[in-house]
Structures are given as structure tokens and as C-alpha cells.
Amino acid sequence: MLNIVILAAGKGTRMHSDKPKVLHGLAGRSLLQHVMDTATQLTPVCTCVIYGHGGDAVPQAMAKYAASFVLQEPQLGTGHAVQQALPHLKDNSTTLVLYGDVPLIQSHTLKLLLHKPEALNLLTLNMDNPTGYGRIIRDSAGKVISIVEEKDATPAQRAVTEINTGILAAPTQLLRVWLNNLQNNNSQGEYYLTDIVAMAVKQGVEVSTSQPRNYWEVMGVNSKVQLAELERLWQAEQALQLLQQGVTLADPARIDVRGKLVCGRDVEIDVGCIFEGEVHLGSKVKVGAYTIVRESKIEAGTHIAPFSHIDSASIGENCSIGPYARIRPGTQLHNDVHVGNFVEIKNSEIKTGSKANHLSYIGDSTVGSRVNVGAGTITCNYDGVNKHRTIIEDDVFIGSDTQLIAPVTVKRGSTIGAGSTITRDTPENALTLSRAKQLTVAGWQRPTKQKK
Ligand code: UD1
Ligand code: CA
């Protein structure tokens, strides 16, 4: 059984922000969400978040998670913070301590840390420059004897390069006893969580250490500078994983994955693309430069030309989209659909082989197969109060610059003459147009410039 305590009460002064530090975003999720999502993967019996600033902002932002939230006020140190969680922890279990501002910790590292349930397990790291961190002090046999904070350390102790990441796991009952015995007689007048190490040693409890697979897993965020650095490290990691799976990236430093990107074989992604939420790209999909795709599924062989924006849509096989296409939520494109430049599609279904290649708005519509939507065609779906549907059946040809005033049905095989305003259903296989007759005024003369 596992309890997880997440410390998130720090003020985050150096963020220079009104928002609690742990609610700042990294790759599309808040720092705390990253930690909560990783915690969830370990299936804890209890998760307890210690928060301190921003009123109810932290519990509110995390409402979808099954966790308890405890306000730590005042904040008297990391040991005091974990004390606040004690009433919530289940006994006969292990308690894992995580940090809301250390967002990129990964479950494989935590599983390694948790492999000795009877010991006090510390996650440590060797750093070239350990300045600012608590140091892991070992005896001549290499056994951990304590953690000393930088501010309390002797010069010899400061020379130690093995640091305390802060993340640790301990048997819950022992943790209760240790925390209740903490003192604050140190240079900062705080209750240090790290003091439990010396207590464990004194009691003969084994102190075990392990290291993270990647150093960025234990990097904390205290400033916007560190937040930006961590964002780049995480994006580099996403790009590396995509390359290792066989995705072609024009430049691994110019892709942003803010969620989960799942790719088939031989996918190609040009520079400057952003993927948000869960996005699936089928085999041989090509994504042109500066395209944004959010919460969408794009099937095999579809090509997206540059500067397209696709949100909450499902796009079939071998479609051709963009450049400058805008595909909005609720859009379903079947196979072999062409959507060209400056075409906006919202909440519409377009069936196989249909085309809207230039400057159109298709909203709240059902479009059949093999339909051609001419340039400048608009479905007028909104009467100022309500939205209405436009139905365009199979094999329709709509001439350019047509307005379809919904609700309206353009029947199978209809042809609509260019420039029409269609207000009533059109019959099958006929030409329908609404257009003032062309006339020529004989003998008309252009005005000429009058001399003053
Ligand atoms: C702590 C460790 C140090 C370690 C370092 C890693 C202690 C005494 N020291 O140092 O050994 O190298 O982390 O970054 O534990 N927090 C609360 N309530 C509090 C105090 C802190 O929730 O009263 C939270 C903070 O929001 C933060 C975390 O605990 O997420 C660590 O606090 P911080 O002040 O940054 O730790 P340090 O004292 O620098
Ligand atoms: Ca500090």
C-alpha cells in the first residue's frame, strides 16, 4: 500500500506572479498536474497535497483528482509540511514524498525508489555544482548517516557532490514517529524533513539510496527561467522519443508536444508545429510547417499543408488539408477529402472525395460524397439567435460565391449556379440558381473629368 504526499506550499516568490507556483504550466499541464498524473500511475491508496498560497486556487484546479488537500499555514519547513498530512495517511504502508514544483519525476524512477519497503529510501543525485542543496553524508563504509543542509554544513560537508533531491519514501509508521520528534534548532529555524535520516540511522533502520534515470526528473522550478529551461528539456525528450520511434522531424528543436502524440510509421513533421492534448497521426501523415493540431485523429496518408489549425476533429485517410485551413471542433472528414486555403469547417461531416478548396465557411453541415464546394461558398448557419443545419447530398456541385441559408437541403446531384443565395431545398439533378439577370445598357458613357 502506498500513500503519496505532495508538498506544494512554497510561495514561489521568484516567479513574480499572482498565481501559486505549482499552477504554472509546462507542456500543457500545470506543474502540479504533472506530479499528480505520475502519482496516479503508482495507484496510491491516498494522495495528500499540502498547499499554502492562493486561497482555494490549488484544490480547485485539481478538483478532478481523488486527493485530499491540506492547508499548511504558517509554513515551518518540509518536515512540518509532511506532518500536516499524517492524519490522512493509511498505516501498514509506505509513504512517498513528492514536490509540486518538481514536475518531471517519472514513474520508473519512483518504482525503483520504492523497491525496499522496510527502508528509508532517498532519491539522490551527483551534481557538478551542488550549491544550495542538502548534502548526503556517508560514513567511511559508504553508509548514509545524515543529510546536512547547505546553510548548516561545514566546508568539508559542502564539498560533497551527492545531493538530496528531497524525494523519499519511508514506512508510514516510522515516519509518524520521526516527524513527531523533529526539532527546529537549525540555522533556518525550520522543521527539516531531512532530519529523519539521522533518526533512522540511530534506530538501525536501513537508509537506501537510488538515482533518477534522467537528471531533469528531479529539477525544481523556482523561477520563470527554470520553468523555461525545464520546458525545453521536456520538449527535447518528447522529440527524442518520436525520432526513436521513426518519426521524421525537420528539426527536433522546433516541435512542441503539449500532451500525447501518437504516430504511425513514416510520419513527417515540419518545423514549428504544436500538438496539444491527445493527437493521433496515422502512417505516412505529413504535417506542414507551423501547424497546430489539438485533440484530433488524422488517418494514414493525409497531408496537412503549412499554417493549418485543427482542433477536436477526425480526419480520414489520404485527405489534403491547407495551407491555412481551419478545422474546428466536431468536424469529421471521411477519406480523400480536400480542404484548401482559407476554408473554415465547424461541426460538420464531409464524406468521401468531396472538395472545398478555396475561401469557404462550412458550419453545422452534412456534406455527401463527391461534392464540389466552389470558392467563397458560405453556409449561413446562424440567424442571429439559433444555429441551423445545411445538408448537401452526394454529387452536388456548388458554384462559387454561393450562400446556403440554413436550414436547407441541396438534393443529390444538384448544381447551384455561381453567386446564388439558396433559401429553399433544391431538387435532385437540376440546376438551381438565384441571380439577377445580366443586362447591358446601350449607349451608356463613362463620366469624364470636368475641367474647373
Ligand atoms: C529541500 C531539502 C534539501 C534538498 C532540496 C531539493 C529540506 C530541509 N531540505 O531544500 O535537502 O536538497 O529541498 O530541492 O527538506 N515546502 C512546503 N512547506 C514548507 C516548506 C517547503 O510545502 O514549509 C515545499 C516547497 O513548496 C517546495 C519543497 O517543499 O516544493 C522544498 O522546499 P524548499 O524550501 O525549496 O526546500 P529547501 O529548503 O531548499
Ligand atoms: Ca528553500
Image: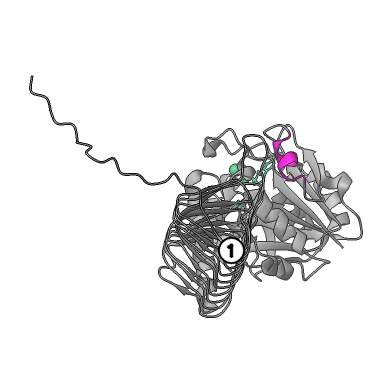
Whether 154 is drawn above or below 318: the answer is above
- Mark 1: which secondary structure? strand
Front residue of this view, candidates 240 and 212: 240
Colour theme: one colour
Magenta stretch: helix, strand or loop mostly: helix
Asked whether the viewer can see residue 313, the reply is yes
Name the foreground residue: 174 vs 31. 31
Residue holding disc 1:
125
Q: Is residue 241 left or right of residue 57?
A: left
Instruction: State the residue lying farthest toward the top.
Output: 452
Q: Quadrant of the C terminus?
A: top left
Q: Which residues are magenta?
A: 56-63
Q: Is residue 50 magenta?
A: no
On the image, the x and y values in percent for residue 50 come to 75, 43
Question: Magenta span has 62?
Answer: yes
- Residue 160 visible (yes or no): no
Residue nearer the viewer, 125 or 276:
276
Percent x, y of residue 43: 81, 62
Q: Nearer the viewer, residue 391 or 16?
A: 391
- The picture quadrant where one finds residue 172 is bottom right
Is 387 above or below relative to 231?
above
Q: Name which quarter of the figure residue 201 lies in.
A: bottom right
Instruction: Name the side, left or right, on which 207 lies relative to 377.
Output: right
Please name the amino acid that badge 1 sits on. Answer: Leu
